[in-house]
């Protein structure tokens, strides 16, 4: 971090930055209202009305919104409080909820106000991109992180609720359940998690019949499955645009899953806090890099992982600093008007360059997971946590 940034961070408090972040989220919502760019929000809010009318949520409803609804029936029900609000109010509240959950998650994960401010600065541009698109990605990133922090603090029920909500927003959120392996009460978490998933699965029965609910879940699975034929800003996109690869996306995702799960074979490292932190960062990047439907607004999830990874170092190496700068310049800045349009349109987009710096960081994280603590000094964010449940 430059001395200028460090000096600025020391002058402002976490509360000031957090409040500004939430206010900014609300203002970005107002901006989209004034510009009449609210289709993404309508795609969240209108399915509730289709749900209570017993309709298939996954058909075209051009009178409500463009595109196809891609979220779960449970999410449509959970969105009811916002759906019942006037759109203008709902949009502002929705954006502020997204920002607040991400801020809270990073705060409780890192636990150091100054470092949390750095984390918020790292994710800022991607958060703005997601919030301008009225997307759920800040919320999802927060829920994935909160799954870990709640496990660490023995809040097993809240950990289960966090991962269940994440899964019903975007199905890959279930990857956060992997964090349970680090903790003694993993089996209790598994039971409570399955119960939470079941209750949320059945929750729409409050407003519709069982046969209609089953129809909707089948339709949801079809929508999720159909996305397997498209690639955007992901590893699969890199393979296609760089190498003309036309193989199975599922094969690439399976290979990625094997790589991300493999470090867990080192049971002796489960209790090491820096190993856990790196693994959380790895999952946050993995669910974006190996998601064939990843778009630019999705990258706030991956950048949350990058922030956790970078801030885990007591003294980052020149390579680590270089990778962070590359992420900020190519991944984050390339999505803004501050980046030269010619480079964005002729290089970044055609060659899926937005994903490349994050992929490089993720590869380095995999190496560090196998060599964690060997030669590098790490910050252990959870070392002082009195409720730590890590295996000993």
Image: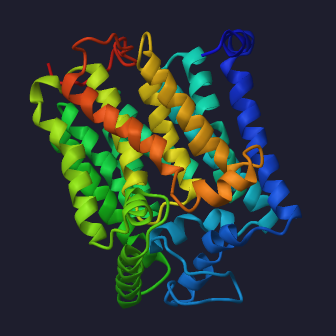
- Measured along the vertical axis of the image, is residue 51 above or below residue 317? below
Q: Quadrant of residue 332?
A: top right
Residue 144: percent from left, percent from top: 42, 44
Residue 270: percent from left, percent from top: 18, 27
Q: Look at the image and tell me in which quarter the C terminus lies.
A: top left
- Measured along the vertical axis of the image, is residue 210 above or below residue 269? below
The structure residue drawn at horizontal position 36% and vertical position 48%, both measured from the top left corner, is 286
Q: Look at the image and tell me in which quarter the N terminus lies.
A: top right
Closest to the observer: 100 or 229?
Answer: 229
- In the image: residue 264, left or right of residue 102: left
- In the image: residue 145, left or right of residue 371: right
Residue that extends furthest to the right in the rendered view of this protein: 34
Q: Quadrant of residue 371?
A: top left
Residue 232: percent from left, percent from top: 49, 65
The structure residue drawn at horizontal position 59% and vertical position 36%, both measured from the top left corner, is 328
Closest to the observer: 194 or 335?
Answer: 335
Q: Quadrant of residue 10?
A: top right
């Amino acid at each position: 971090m430059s001395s200028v940034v460090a000096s600025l961070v020391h002058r402002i408090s976490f509360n000031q930055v957090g409040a500004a972040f939430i206010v900014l989220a609300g203002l970005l919502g107002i901006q989209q209202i004034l510009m009449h760019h609210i289709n993404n929000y309508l795609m969240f809010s209108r399915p509730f009305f289709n749900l209570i009318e017993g309709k298939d949520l996954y058909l075209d409803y051009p009178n409500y919104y463009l595109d196809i609804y891609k979220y779960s029936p449970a999410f449509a029900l959970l969105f009811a409080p916002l759906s019942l609000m006037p759109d203008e109010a709902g949009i502002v509240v929705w954006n502020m909820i997204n920002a607040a959950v991400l801020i809270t998650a990073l705060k409780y994960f890192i636990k150091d106000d100054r470092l949390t401010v750095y984390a918020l600065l790292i994710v800022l541009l991607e958060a703005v991109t997601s919030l301008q698109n009225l997307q759920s990605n800040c919320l999802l990133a927060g829920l994935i992180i909160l799954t870990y922090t709640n496990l660490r603090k023995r809040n097993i029920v809240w950990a289960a609720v966090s991962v269940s909500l994440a899964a019903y927003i975007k199905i890959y959120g279930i990857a956060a359940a992997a964090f349970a392996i680090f903790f003694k009460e993993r089996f209790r978490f598994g039971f409570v998690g399955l119960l939470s998933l079941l209750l949320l699965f059945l929750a729409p029965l409050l407003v519709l019949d069982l046969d209609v609910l089953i129809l909707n879940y089948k339709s949801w699975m079809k929508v999720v499955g159909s996305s397997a034929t498209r690639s955007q800003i992901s590893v699969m996109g890199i393979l296609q645009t760089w190498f003309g690869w036309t193989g199975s996306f599922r094969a690439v995702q399976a290979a990625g899953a094997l790589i991300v799960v493999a470090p867990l074979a080192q049971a002796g490292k489960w209790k090491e806090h820096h190993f856990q932190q790196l693994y959380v960062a790895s999952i946050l990047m993995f669910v974006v890099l190996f998601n064939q439907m990843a778009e630019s607004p999705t990258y706030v999830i991956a950048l949350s992982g990058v922030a956790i990874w970078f801030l885990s170092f007591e003294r980052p190496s020149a390579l680590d600093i270089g990778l962070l700068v590359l992420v900020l310049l190519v991944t984050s800045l390339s999505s803004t008007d501050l980046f030269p349009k010619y480079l964005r349109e002729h290089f970044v987009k055609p060659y899926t360059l937005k994903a490349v710096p994050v992929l490089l960081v993720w590869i380095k994280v995999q190496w560090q997971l196998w060599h964690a603590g060997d030669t590098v000094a790490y910050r252990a964010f959870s070392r002082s946590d009195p409720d730590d449940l890590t295996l000993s």
